[in-house]
Amino acid sequence: MEYTARLLVFDLDGTLVDSKEDLANAVNVALESFDLPPLSKPVIYSYVGDGASALILRALPPEDADLLPKVLDRFLAYYQRHLLDSTRAYPGVVGALRKWAGIYRMAVLTNKGVAMSREILSGLSLDGYFFEVRGGDSFGTKKPDPEGLLHILREAGVEARETIMIGDSRNDVLAGKAAGAVTCGVTYGLGASGFLEHPPDFTIDRFPDLFHRIRPI
């Protein structure tokens, strides 16, 4: 099935960029700073997607949950300095965005803090493709709440049915469906297992495949 769209709204981590290595390194630096045991990278990857506070809370041993504010501060301070150590755009992202940015309006909606998100996009020369970038601290809620997506729809002057929300996790699917948008799940990201319980309208295995499944209105 082919879908039509005017607006494409992308998640960031696990969708546009592969940032898992830098996130995992920052989590373990923060834990070890408080003499807490480091975690395996696959375990940390499974905790990504709901923002920094949720990531660190999941990484903390339950008996040390009271350390959340301090460990979170340490994580953010370290991660801020190492956002682009190994973070890169997924294969095909740069070429596809370059080809299609003049055809579709594009935005980013992520649960990562907006300042770090913009810094990553700028550092990877991706920022010029998006008319708006919003993060987990841009609104009173994060995905899966549709607040941020509905805001972007209003800013774009586009109907929900003319919009596709693209992401790698259940949060993206739930936010998109709650807003009335079409949802696309990317299977190469971090949270594709969540699609079993919350299936998107369609999935793609490679980023450029998106543009074989859609056409402009």
Image (cartoon, rainbow, N blue to C red):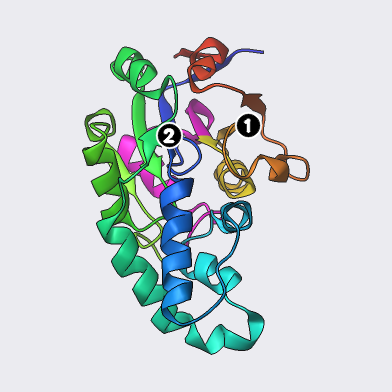
Q: Which residues are magenta?
A: 141-165
Based on the displayed image, in which of its 4 quarters is residue 93 positioned? Answer: top left
Where 155 falls versus 74 (above or below)? above
Few, some or many residues within 10 Å of mark 1 (<14, 14–19, 20+): many
Where 124 falls versus 37 (above or below)? above
Few, some or many residues within 10 Å of mark 2 (<14, 14–19, 20+): many
Which label was assigned to residue 187? 1
Q: Look at the numbered discs 2 and 1 and tell me whether their residues touch, using CB distance below 8 Å.
A: no
Tell which of 204 and 142 is nearer to you. 204
**Residue 38 location, x and y as percent?**
55, 68
Based on the displayed image, in which of its 4 quarters is residue 216 positioned? Answer: top left
Element type at mark 2: loop
Disc 2 or 1, which lies upstream in sequence? 2
Which label was assigned to residue 16? 2
Q: Kindly identify the amino acid type of the residue bearing the numbered disc 2.
A: Leu
Q: Quadrant of the C terminus?
A: top left
**Residue 208 location, x and y as percent?**
48, 17
**Residue 210 location, x and y as percent?**
52, 19
Instruction: Tell me if 1 is positioned left or right of 13 in this view.
Output: right
Where 123 falls versus 7 (above or below)? below
Q: Quadrant of the N terminus?
A: top right
Assess whether residue 146 is covered by the magenta stretch: yes
- Residue located at (27% from left, 28% from top): 129
Element type at mark 1: loop
Tell which of 102 and 163 is nearer to you. 102
**Residue 108 location, x and y as percent?**
37, 40
Q: Which residue extends farthest right? A: 197
- Residue located at (34% from left, 67% from top): 76
Q: Kindly identify the amino acid type of the residue bearing the numbered disc 1.
A: Thr
Instruction: Tell me if 16 is positioned left or right of 185 in this view.
Output: left
Which label was assigned to residue 96? none
Instruction: Tell me if 178 is positioned left or right of 106 in this view.
Output: right
